[in-house]
Amino acid sequence: MSNKNDYTPAKVWTWESESGGKFASINRPIAGATHDKTLPIGEHSFQLYSLATPNGQKAAIMFEELLELGINDAQYDAYLINIGEGDQFGSDFVNINPNSKIPALLDHSTTPPTRVFESGSILQYLGEKFNAFIPKGLVAKTECRNWLFWQMGSAPYLGGGFGHFYSYAPSKMQYPIDRFTMETKRQLDVLNQHLSNNDYMAGDEYSIADIAIWPWYGSLVLGDLYDAAEFLDVASYTHVVRWAKHIAERPAVKRGRRVNRTWGPEEDQLAERHSADDFK
């Protein structure tokens, strides 16, 4: 039986119109810069170009955690990249990240400066550079990376899948919402079962795996992502909630989640970050 909403794909897909939804105006099927734009450079070795989405929060939280340890060489400047306005398609940004996604990082302590893109790569780069938040033993280090790469592969189903169709799509469609809700709940159960026997993702030690996962799944169960906590019954994932609340109380996490944020309560916003004084 056919349905009036059935869609028959063309033999060859062509880009003829915007797809609809919140980010339709910046979506396109081609890569590369759309305009020339020079990025600002501050006084520190590390220049972060980002936005306080879950992926952007990872890099800022990592920097703040390093500074919390007293590693002053991790001082950084953070500049806002407004993805709604297409800043990620500016020429300088594309030179750092040809994939045109935030966050993007330049390390000017090397000659020439080292570009680092993809949030997981940024976490690993900083963790290795400063010998912090990556477990030392091979088994624990491998477990940390297991979960880091789990997040890289899983979060697109939460963000581009569930989040898009539940919050951003121009109309509610049962099939994709059901499909990605089921997958999101499965992922939450994966985390819940693991955290039932572990304080953190790599065991007893807080690591870059926690820093990668918390902005997505911690924010979700704490009710700060997609306004979907009740819909997903997040309270039932008790071990994830416990872990999320514990990490949310870390001073560096409180600071890092504010960096490059320009929405929400004013006390949670910090469009740019150049020193610790900016948080006062």
Image: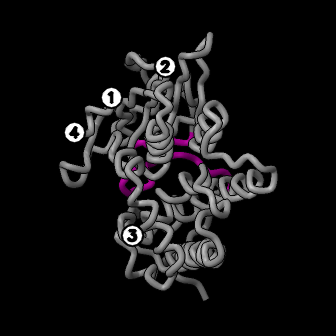
Give how far across and how far down residue 231 sits, in percent: 41, 81
Q: Foreground mark, 1 or 3? A: 1
Residue type at the position of mark 1: Ser
The first of marks 1 and 4 along the sequence is 1
Q: Which residue is mark 1?
A: 275
Residue type at the position of mark 2: Ser
Task: Please tell me whether residue 229 is drawn above or below residue 57 in the rendered image.
Answer: below
Instruction: Report how many numbered discs are placed on residues in the image.
Output: 4
Quarter assignment of residue 276: top left
Residue type at the position of mark 3: Leu
Q: Residues within 10 Å of mark 3 (few under 14, many from 20)?
A: some
Q: Residues within 10 Å of mark 2 (few under 14, many from 20)?
A: some
How far apart are the alpha carbons under marks 3 and 2? 34 Å
The first of marks 2 and 4 along the sequence is 2
The first of marks 1 and 3 along the sequence is 3
Q: Which residue is mark 2?
A: 45
Task: Please tell me whether residue 61 is drawn above or below residue 156 in the rendered image.
Answer: above
Task: Please tell me whether residue 106 is drawn above or below residue 221 in the rendered image.
Answer: above
Q: Residue at x 58, y 47 (%)?
A: 14
Closer to us: 133 or 220: 133
